[in-house]
Image (tube, helix red, strand yellow):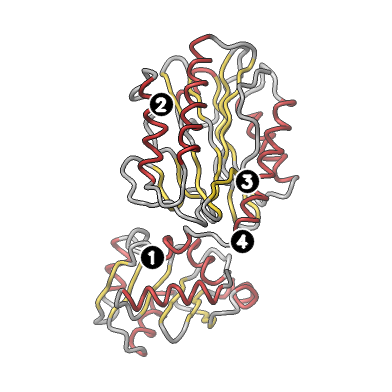
């Protein structure tokens, strides 16, 4: 979707919410609405204009990337620039990203001018939920890089390597294949360590006859992929195999139930019911999934308390897991996409129980 269409949609929402001016401060939202990829700046959006305000370091980048915006370079910080802007313009209501701006920053801004400040309530994030064709292409390429890295690492790893060794090799491989960076701090957790859903990598050695959970993602042209696979190094116990099969069936149940218009919490329940019925209550403590795009975690949220409804154009993960303290954990995660009423799985790596 061209930048001008994204801005047009936002401006329509501002009118509907009786907001004269919006200040966009979250960098992914600025990028989405302007194309600007710098790390300092704010976007000011009104019905009449769109201003990208940044500092001298990013003048050239702003001019090259944000062609739909007026570029303003401030010398005394954004607060001083904003104060002057508010005095010159007649807007009475100013929207800001209340879930991102600190209370201290809000206090400074609210003292600059006699206007009414209104929360944007994730208006931009709601727009970002629906991906266009070019966004999907970038996510697919990021997923392709992750898939190739997983295939590579299966032939690379062996007992005695550390979790750090494997993570470093994965990141190096993905960068060689075109990733700008990893989408998050990669998770490589072996044995009992895999019972921690977001385990930090350690110098623990991967032992023979143990679970190994790998959660990985690449960034390609600003867009993320996310995938988790759990494999067995050596042989597994019947208990570990039972856990793996339960997680696999839980994900399959959720995937079969996906349809446009379904509430996200219903999808979460489909997977959670399978896990609970197998006797693993309280062993699946996180949401079933989350949106993926410019950020690794974005809307929609696929969880028991989510109010999101799943529709065409949404990209999100489906990632049930079981985590047993003292034994280990299993998670299987894929990125899926709704297109013309049908669900399509973007990540392609095999999900059968792999033993190496």
Q: Count neighbours of disc 4 (C-alpha within 10 A) and say few if under 14, some if 14 to 19, many if 20 or more.
A: few
Is the residue 88 above or below the residue 37 in the image?
Answer: below
Tell me if 298 is positioned left or right of 137 in this view: left
Q: Which residue is mark 3?
A: 218
Q: Which residue is mark 2?
A: 274
Q: Which residue is mark 4?
A: 133
Task: Compute the Cα span from label 3 to label 2.
Answer: 30 Å
Camera-side mark, 1 or 2? 2
Given contact means CB atoms under 8 Å apart, are the residues at marks 1 and 2 in contact?
A: no
Tell me if 204 is positioned left or right of 151 in this view: left
Mark identifier at residue 123 = 1
Camera-side mark, 4 or 1? 4
Residue 257, percent from left and from top: 45, 39
Residue 24, percent from left and from top: 42, 69
Camera-side mark, 3 or 4? 4
Q: Which of these two is toward me, 128 or 73?
A: 128
Task: Compute the Cα span from label 3 to label 4.
Answer: 19 Å
Residue at (70% x, 42% y) in the render: 174
Q: Quadrant of the N terminus?
A: bottom right
Task: Compute the Cα span from label 1 to label 3.
Answer: 26 Å
Tell me if 290 is positioned left or right of 305 in this view: right
Residue 196, picture quadrant: top left
Give the secondary structure at mark 3.
Answer: strand
């Amino acid at each position: 979707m061209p930048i001008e269409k994204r801005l047009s949609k936002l401006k329509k929402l501002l009118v509907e919410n009786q907001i004269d001016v919006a200040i966009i401060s979250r960098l992914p939202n600025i990028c989405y609405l302007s194309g600007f990829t710098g790390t300092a700046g704010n976007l000011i959006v009104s019905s009449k204009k769109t201003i990208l305000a940044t500092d001298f370091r990013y003048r050239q980048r702003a001019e090259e990337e944000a062609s739909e915006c007026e570029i303003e370079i401030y010398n005394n910080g954004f607060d001083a620039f904003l104060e002057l802007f508010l005095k010159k313009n007649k807007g009475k209501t100013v929207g800001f990203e209340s879930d991102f701006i600190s209370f201290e920053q809000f206090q400074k801004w609210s003292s600059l001018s006699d206007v009414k400040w209104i929360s944007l309530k994730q208006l931009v994030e709601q727009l970002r939920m629906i991906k266009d064709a070019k966004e999907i292409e970038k996510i697919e390429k990021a997923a392709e890089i992750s898939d190739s890295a997983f295939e590579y690492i299966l032939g690379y790893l062996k007992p005695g390597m550390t979790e750090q060794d494997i993570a470093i090799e994965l990141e190096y491989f993905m960068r060689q294949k075109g990733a700008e960076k990893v989408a998050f701090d990669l998770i490589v957790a072996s044995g009992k360590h895999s019972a921690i859903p977001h385990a930090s990598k350690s110098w623990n050695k991967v032992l023979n006859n143990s679970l190994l959970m790998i959660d990985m993602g690449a960034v390609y042209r600003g867009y993320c992929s996310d995938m988790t696979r759990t494999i067995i190094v050596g042989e597994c116990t019947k208990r570990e195999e039972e856990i793996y099969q339960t997680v696999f069936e839980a994900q399959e149940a959720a995937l079969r139930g996906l349809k446009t218009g379904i509430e996200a919490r219903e999808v979460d329940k489909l997977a959670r019911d399978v896990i609970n019925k197998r006797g693993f209550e309280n062993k699946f403590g996180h949401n079933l999934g989350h949106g993926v795009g410019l950020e690794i975690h974005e809307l929609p949220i696929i969880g028991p308390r989510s109010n999101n409804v799943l529709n065409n154009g949404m990209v999100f993960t489906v990632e049930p897991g079981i985590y047993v303290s003292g034994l280990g954990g299993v998670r299987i995660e894929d990125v899926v996409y709704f297109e013309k009423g049908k669900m399509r799985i973007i990540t392609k790596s095999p999900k059968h129980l792999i033993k190496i």
